[in-house]
């Protein structure tokens, strides 16, 4: 499948399972049948990914795995162009850079967290400092237009080239947050 303003099946490609499709009424003169993917489960997200649709489920387990134990309802990250075309039980998180969703790393997680929990983004970046590529973090934050949120939690510590937009939180307050949100124990 290729990503347009909607999903269109390529010649010879298998369709998504029927339970994942909601048909959109065909407009006059349009030769192809359009449909809206309906995403209800993590398995549905994996099916979309197998069909080369850049979709990503941001879960509390993923954030916890990266060193910040939290609980929240999952978010479905999809490209902006597709965000209004997907029907989902998950909350939708539109992303400008669709390529970032194809091979997500810690930089993508930090960028996605900036949208709804900037302090968690800071803690995850701190606890994964060795695996963060500063150029990639810079690119992802800039592509999403999140410079102000990044400045607020001082992500310039991890990507020095990020421009400062707005007023950052005091360093002492950030240290207090990092100290009072302990990392997971090594065994579990």
Image (cartoon, rainbow, N blue to C red):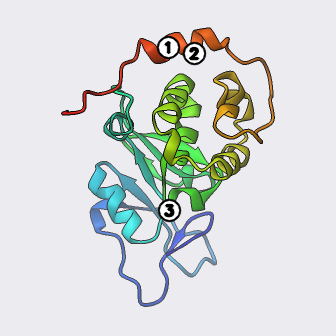
Q: CA distance from mark 2 to mark 1?
A: 5 Å
- For the point 73% across and 38% down, the residue is 160
Q: Is residue 159 visible?
A: yes
Q: Position of residue 140 (x, y in %)?
A: 65, 49
| Quarter the C terminus occupies | top left
Foreground mark, 3 or 1, reads 1
Label placed on residue 68: none
Q: Position of residue 71 (x, y in %)?
A: 33, 26
- Return the residue at label 2: 174
Q: Is residue 50 left or right of residue 85?
A: left
For the residues labelled 3 and 1, say whether their Cβ atoms are less than 8 Å apart.
Answer: no
- For the point 42% across and 59% down, the residue is 37
Badge 2: how crowded within 10 Å, few (<14), some, or many (20+)?
Answer: some
**Number of numbered markers:** 3
Q: CA distance from mark 3 to mark 2?
A: 31 Å
Q: Position of residue 36 (x, y in %)?
A: 46, 60
- For the point 36% across and 76% down, the residue is 15
Badge 1: how crowded within 10 Å, few (<14), some, or many (20+)?
Answer: some
- Return the residue at label 1: 177
């Amino acid at each position: 499948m290729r990503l347009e303003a909607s999903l269109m099946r390529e010649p010879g490609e298998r369709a998504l399972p029927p339970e994942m499709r909601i048909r959109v009424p065909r407009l006059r003169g349009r030769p192809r049948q359009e449909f809206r993917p309906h995403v209800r489960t993590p398995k549905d997200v994996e099916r979309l990914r197998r069909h080369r649709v850049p979709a990503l489920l941001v879960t509390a387990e993923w954030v916890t795995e990266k060193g910040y134990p939290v609980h929240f309802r999952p978010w479905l990250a999809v490209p902006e162009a597709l965000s209004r075309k997907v029907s989902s039980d998950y909350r939708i998180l539109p992303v400008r850079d669709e390529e970032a969703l194809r091979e997500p790393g810690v930089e993508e997680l930090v960028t996605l967290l900036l949208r709804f929990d900037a302090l968690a983004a800071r803690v995850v970046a701190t606890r994964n400092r060795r695996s963060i590529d500063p150029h990639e973090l810079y690119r992802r934050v800039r592509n999403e237009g999140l410079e102000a949120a990044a400045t607020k939690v001082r992500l310039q510590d991890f990507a020095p080239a990020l421009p400062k937009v707005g007023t950052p939180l005091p360093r002492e307050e950030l240290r207090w947050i990092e100290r009072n949100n302990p990392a997971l124990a090594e065994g579990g």
